[in-house]
């Protein structure tokens, strides 16, 4: 049984019922919001561990809520999106969401994704190991300083704010520096599941793009996160 708090941003009565029953049965404490104001209020009042947003609602700006949450917090965000709406998935990820789930969704799949993100957002819950052995040293690579113990990243002595997923992705890449990693391997180690559809690997591409935007001086000619053509990505050797 779990006891983390989950904030659900959704107006759909049926989805609310399903989530109340399924997540409540597992021990999660579930809160609901249907507006941006309610969402931000509950974020402050309840300090949830994860937010679940139904992105396709006529009377709700799911993208705007995602942006506002990300402006204030690195809390894990999962989006609920339509089966055929690939553009919604990509846009949501670009705005800061950590993962998505396609409707109609399997409650079991949702529970697995929630648990995976919660483990990665709280190192004390994390029972997986990256491909290479972890260490806790402070690593300096050019102008970058990466501290694995505090999960902080600095560039030019200025801290760069990363979400937990972004830091875990960075950690996996630089602990395997010089070794090309496929999108499937990255997805499995960072998000905790194997892609069922080709589009699932776009999660990796979008997060790599976001991470490059924070690390690189020029994202078109990256110095740190390199593209391994025909394979995936790798961190530069150091």
Image: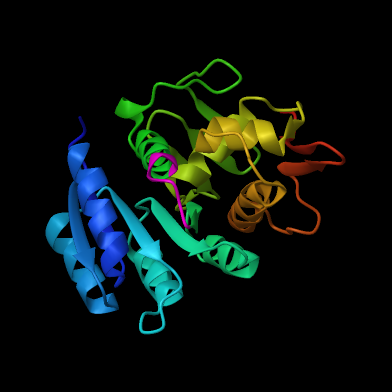
Q: Residue furthest left?
A: 45
Q: Tell whether position 107 is magenta.
A: yes
Q: Position of residue 173 (x, y in %)?
A: 64, 33
Q: Is residue 202 left or right of residue 153?
A: right
Magenta span: 104-109
Residue at image coords 67%, 46% = 197
The residue lying toward the viewer, choosing from 216 and 9, is: 9
The residue lying toward the viewer, choosing from 19 and 206, is: 19
Q: Quadrant location of residue 86? A: bottom right
The residue lying toward the viewer, choosing from 11 and 130, is: 11
| Residue 72 visible in the snapshot | yes
Q: Position of residue 103 (x, y in %)?
A: 48, 59
Q: Tell whether position 97 is magenta.
A: no
The residue lying toward the viewer, choosing from 213 and 65, is: 65
Q: Work out whether 182 lies above or below 30.
A: above
Way the structure is coloured: rainbow
Q: Work out whether 87 lies above or below 149.
A: below
Residue at image coords 36%, 40% = 111
Q: Residue furthest bottom?
A: 59
Q: Is residue 11 left or right of residue 54?
A: left
| Residue 140 visible in the snapshot | no
Residue at image coords 63%, 69% = 87
Q: Quadrant of the N terminus?
A: top left
Q: Residue furthest right?
A: 230
Q: Position of residue 101 (x, y in %)?
A: 49, 53
Residue at image coords 61%, 50% = 203
Q: Position of residue 76 (x, y in %)?
A: 38, 50
């Amino acid at each position: 049984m779990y006891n983390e708090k989950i904030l659900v941003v959704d107006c759909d009565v049926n989805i609310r019922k399903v989530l109340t029953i399924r997540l409540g049965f597992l021990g999660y404490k579930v809160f609901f919001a249907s507006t941006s104001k309610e969402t931000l209020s509950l974020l402050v009042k309840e300090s949830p561990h994860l937010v679940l947003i139904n992105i396709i609602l006529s009377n709700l700006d799911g993208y705007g809520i995602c942006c506002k949450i990300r402006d204030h917090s690195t809390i894990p965000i999962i989006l609920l999106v339509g089966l055929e709406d690939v553009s919604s998935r990509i846009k949501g990820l670009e705005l800061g969401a950590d993962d998505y789930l396609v409707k109609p969704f399997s409650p079991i799949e949702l529970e697995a994704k929630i648990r995976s993100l919660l483990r990665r957002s709280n190192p004390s819950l994390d029972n997986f190991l990256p491909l290479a052995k972890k260490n806790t040293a402070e690593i300096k690579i050019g102008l970058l300083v990466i501290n694995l113990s505090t999960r902080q990243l600095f560039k030019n002595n200025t801290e760069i704010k990363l979400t937990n997923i972004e830091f875990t992705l960075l950690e996996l890449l630089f602990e395997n520096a010089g070794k090309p990693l496929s999108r499937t391997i990255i997805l499995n180690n960072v998000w905790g599941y194997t892609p069922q559809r080709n589009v699932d690997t776009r999660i990796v591409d979008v997060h790599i793009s976001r991470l490059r935007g924070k690390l690189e001086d020029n994202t078109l000619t990256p110095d740190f996160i390199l593209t391994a053509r025909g394979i995936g990505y790798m961190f530069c050797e150091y």
